Image: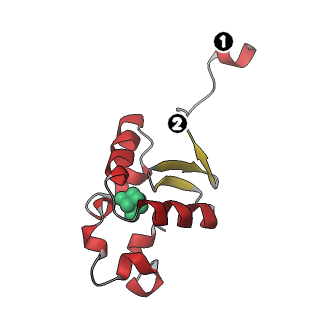
Amino acid sequence: MHPLAQPAGRRPAAWTEPRLGAAQLPCVSDPELFFSEEAEEILAAKAQCARCPVRLTCLNGALQRREPWGVWGGELFHRGVIIAEKRPRGRPRKAAAAA
Ligand code: SF4
């Protein structure tokens, strides 16, 4: 579950401070974007993170929690680690499989 979807008491402190409410975070308006399978949407999510005031806190938290998937702190996570890009679903191409 995305931390922003959790009750306020379970969110990281930086997200519940009175001066920086969760409603001010870029990912609140379209949380699905941050868990998209589409490369263009993943890039759009990363761009929103780039202007987020809690980006480093978010990234550190995601690394500590070993987030299984999604864009966190401007990085794409898969099974707890940062990856450069998401592979399309399905079987690998024959040329790639033979290499
Ligand atoms: S860095 Fe990205 S995922 Fe993290 S709170 Fe900010 S907008 Fe949301």
Tag 1, which secondary structure? helix
Three-letter code, disc 2: Glu
- Residue 74 x/y as whole percent: 44, 50
Residue at 58% in and 31% down: 90
Is residue 6 visible to us here? Answer: no
How far, Cα to Cα, is label 1 from label 2?
A: 20 Å
Quarter of the displayed picture in which ligand 1 can be seen: bottom left
Ligand 1 within 8 Å of disc 2? The answer is no
Is residue 96 visible to us here? Answer: yes
Q: Are marks 1 and 2 in contact (CB under 8 Å)?
A: no
Residue under circle 2? 85
- Residue 35 x/y as whole percent: 43, 52
- Residue 43 x/y as whole percent: 38, 40
Residue at 64% in and 53% down: 79
Residue under circle 1? 95
Three-letter code, disc 1: Ala
